[in-house]
Amino acid sequence: MVASTALQRLHVTGLTWGHKVRANVVMPVITPPDYREQYSIYSGKQYKSFQQMQTEIEAAGYQVGLWKWGDPPHWYNRRQSMVEQYPL
């Protein structure tokens, strides 16, 4: 599940809510400050630094995993068993 912009738009702690229900993807605002007013999909979305997002994610009991697949464990395990069962 994606903890998307919409959750942050609904409530100031929407991102944290998303993580508490096992969301595994975040969509931060990365638009440079000089251009943020010109690009807005959801009005009112708050900019959060990487450190702020990491703190919220860790407060929900998770770790930030950069450059990793976001597949749920059951999908990963199923895929691994298929690879082992049917090697190329």
Image: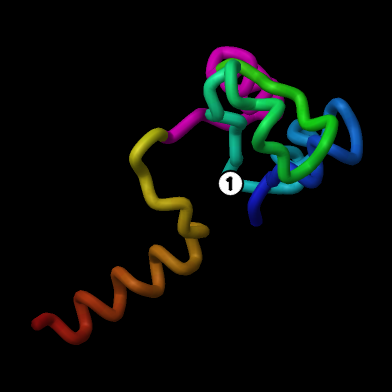
Q: Which residue occupies the foreground of this view, 74 or 40?
A: 40
Please state the extent of the stretch shown in magenta in the rendering: 50-65
Tell me if residue 11 comes above or below residue 2 in the rendering.
Answer: above
Above or below residue 62? Residue 24 is below
Residue density around tag 1, few if under 14, some if 14–19, many if 20 or more, within 10 Å = many
In the rendering, at what x and y percent does residue 64 appear? 49, 30
Image coords of residue 44 (percent x, y): 84, 30
Query: Where is residue 10 drawn, in percent x and y?
Result: 90, 40
- Looking at the image, the residue that sits furthest to the front is 38
Q: Which residue sits furthest right?
A: 11
Q: Which residue is mark 1?
A: 24
Under mark 1, the amino acid is Asn
Q: Is residue 60 magenta?
A: yes
Q: Main secondary structure of the magenta part?
A: helix
Q: Quadrant of the C terminus?
A: bottom left
Residue 12, picture quadrant: top right
- Residue depicted at x 71% and y 27%: 37
Q: Quadrant of residue 87?
A: bottom left
Nearer to the camera, 41 or 45? 41
- Where's the N terminus, which quadrant? bottom right
Q: Nearer the viewer, residue 61 or 23?
A: 23
The residue positioned 80% from the left and 43% from the top of the image is 7
Is residue 44 or residue 23 the one in the foreground?
44
Question: In this rendering, would 55 be left or right of 40?
Answer: left
Tell me which colouring the rendered structure shows: rainbow
**Residue at 79 percent of width and 46 percent of height:** 6
Residue at image x 59%, y 25%? 35
Q: Secondary structure at mark 1?
A: loop
Q: Quadrant of residue 65?
A: top left
